[in-house]
Amino acid sequence: MPGPTELLATWEAGLAAGPVRRAVLLHALTGAEDGGRLEVPVGRRDRELFALRRTLFGERLNGRVTCLDCETEQEFDFDVGNVVGVAMDEPGEVLASSGEWAIRLRRPTSGDLLAAAAAGPAGARRELVTRCAVETTHRGRPSSVDDLPADAQSAMADSLADADTAADVRLTMPCVECGRTTSATVDIVSYLWAELDAWARAVMLEVHLLASAYGWAEPEVLALSPTRRRFYLELVGHG
């Protein structure tokens, strides 16, 4: 389990980063090797992030979803074991088809997503399609990925989502007001980062209060267990 110093370093490194870079930083906390981290398929990466979330913050994840019809906001609980406990999807290539188009794909990795993010909003989808399409055929003949129509690109995304369930975790529930079925995406990177951010800010405050009261340096405060930190905070009137 990563310690407080490592968690704070990850939080600090990710403060100015985008979501894809944050995912890579969080994945490093699972013990994934530096050299191969960018080559791990997104579904496997996210499954490992769900397991990390369970280790750091527990089994139950709390979220909110807004009904598209009546705009009622409601809370939901999600058991991360629903992802961690499911068997890993089989590795290998994925087949997608749309009309007379057939595409053979490999599963996207963190490296692919970083490259897509670097391409900007206008070029992100094209970059991802280009990197993940292994072979493209039209009417049985080889074709360029640049010629893929929008519906074929959508079919690619759907096939990848179906083949890599941990990369696109969704749940559905009825709206408590109007009864319409509402879908919520459980984006583990966003949820885990928000929880790490809240934890880091609380710990930084504890460090400030104890350093001010006792003259301790940050490493000395972080070396204390959470229970002992709370006890010392109570002694100085901050419990």
Image (cartoon, rainbow, N blue to C red):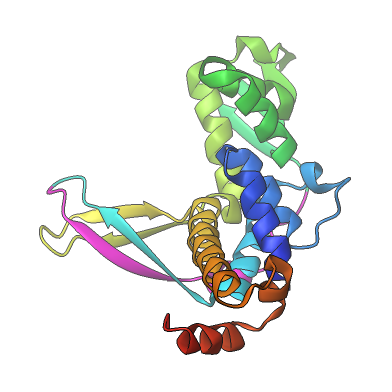
Residue 71 is one of the magenta-drawn residues:
yes
**Would residue 133 be visible to someone looking at this image?**
no
Instruction: Please state if 88 lies on the left or on the right of 180 as rendered.
Output: right
Residue stretch rendered in magenta on the structure: 70-91
Can you say whether 25 is above or below 150 in the image? below
Nearest to the observer: residue 211 or residue 205: 211
Q: Is residue 17 above or below residue 228?
A: above
Horizontal side of residue 128 vs 131, given as left or right: left
Residue 141 magenta-drawn?
no
Name the image quarter holding residue 3.
Answer: bottom right
Residue 103: percent from the left, percent from the top?
Answer: 67, 27
Q: Give the residue displayed 62% in from the left and 45% down from the top.
A: 14
Percent x, y of residue 205 = 50, 65
**Residue 80 versus residue 2: which sits nearer the camera?**
2
Instruction: Name the quadrant of the N terminus.
Output: bottom right
10 relative to 1, above or below: above
Q: Nearer the viewer, residue 237 or 124?
A: 237
The answer, for residue 175, to whether it is visible in the render is yes
Left or right, residue 92 beside residue 194: right
Residue 184: image quadrant is bottom left
Residue 96 image offset from top left, x and y in percent: 62, 33
Name the quadrant of the C terminus.
Answer: bottom left
Question: Which image quadrant for residue 140?
Answer: top right
Query: Residue, x 67% and y 36% (percent of image)?
Result: 95
Residue 229, x across and y down, in percent: 58, 82
Residue at 89% in and 45% down = 35
Side of 95 relative to 207 (left or right): right
Q: Residue at x 67, y 81 (%)?
A: 224
